[in-house]
Image (spheres, grey):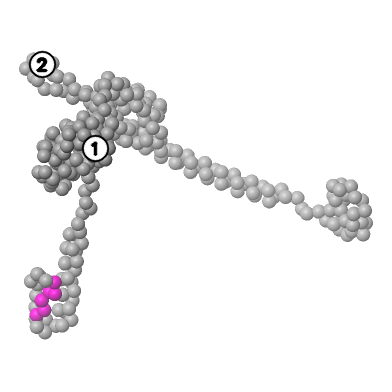
Amino acid sequence: MPAVACPIPGCDYVTADLDATIVAALITAHTTTHTHGATAAVKADRVKRPVISAAGTSEDWQYFISRWSDYVEATKVTGRDRALQLLECCDEPLRKDITRSAGGSLTHRTEAEILAVIKKLAVRQENTMVARVALHNMRQDRDEPIRAFRARLAGQASVCKFTIQCPHELCSRDVNYTDAILRDALIRGTADSDIQLDLLSDKNQDMSLEDVLQFVEAKEAGKRSASRLLDTHATDATSDMVDATASSYKKETPPRPTGRQEGNLHILRTGWPWCPLSSPSQKD
């Protein structure tokens, strides 16, 4: 049989001059490579544009900036289109306030200028001391994983400005001590008092933030496992008790009374001696 070419356009694959059955098998096997390639080339979902509203917090603003950077990286938008997309991130009330404040369109301005205008109207001014007090008053919710609590703490800490300039006269760097504050706030806000006591009584009092997270995670996992184990034992014990009660009931159930006995019982219950059941003719 002559050589057969691949039927897919643009493919140069050609079989050798072989038996018709072998050629058919080779073509079938080869076409699967095109199928896998088409599957791998499925287009990814479109990246969602972030949205920002007025009267937000500094934490909300930091989250928006992070989402906006990801959006720009994914879409590769540039120039005036970037300015348009940035303005479209604002919800309608905020967009209207920005237009009024600027006295017209902002599409001719740079990205940095537009971000500055948005921030003025989208973020409420916050007192740093108030933000720090709020951070130390945060508590872990019931059934909230410790790392989820840590994420909430980190969001609040991002607006607390836990930085200080290096005291060395030859150094002008700002030292960030957020992790140390987060560690203390995490221990203070842990919901389980037993785990909190174990943390405070541990011989290693110089744990890092990650060490504390791993310590609490291990304790929480142990408590969940122990709780499930106790629930299983309790269920088994209840089942055994029910079975034992049913068995005892079967053993202690009195025999059904005979005819005369039933008649006497009926007289005692009703007070009717002439009831047919009380007749002397009633046989056992």
In the image, residue 132 above or below residue 154? above
Which quarter of the figure has residue 201? top left
| Secondary structure state at the residue bearing disc 2 | loop
Range of residues picked out in magenta = 3-8
| 10 Å crowding of disc 2: few (<14), some (14-19), many (20+) | few
239 on left or right of 122: right
Quadrant location, the N terminus: bottom left
103 on left or right of 263: left
Q: Which residue is mark 2?
A: 168
Q: Which residue is mark 1?
A: 96
Give the residue displayed 60% in from the left and 46% down from the top.
242
Q: Nearer the viewer, mark 2 or mark 1?
A: 1
In this orientation, which residue lies closer to the viewer: 253 or 184?
A: 184
Q: Position of residue 222 (x, y in %)?
A: 38, 36
Q: Position of residue 9 (x, y in %)?
A: 11, 71
Q: Position of residue 56 (x, y in %)?
A: 28, 32
Give the residue displayed 26% in from the left and 24% down from the top.
126
Marks 2 and 1, Cα distance to the nearest angstrom? Answer: 49 Å
Amino acid type, callout 1: Lys
Give the residue displayed 16% in from the left and 47% down from the top.
74
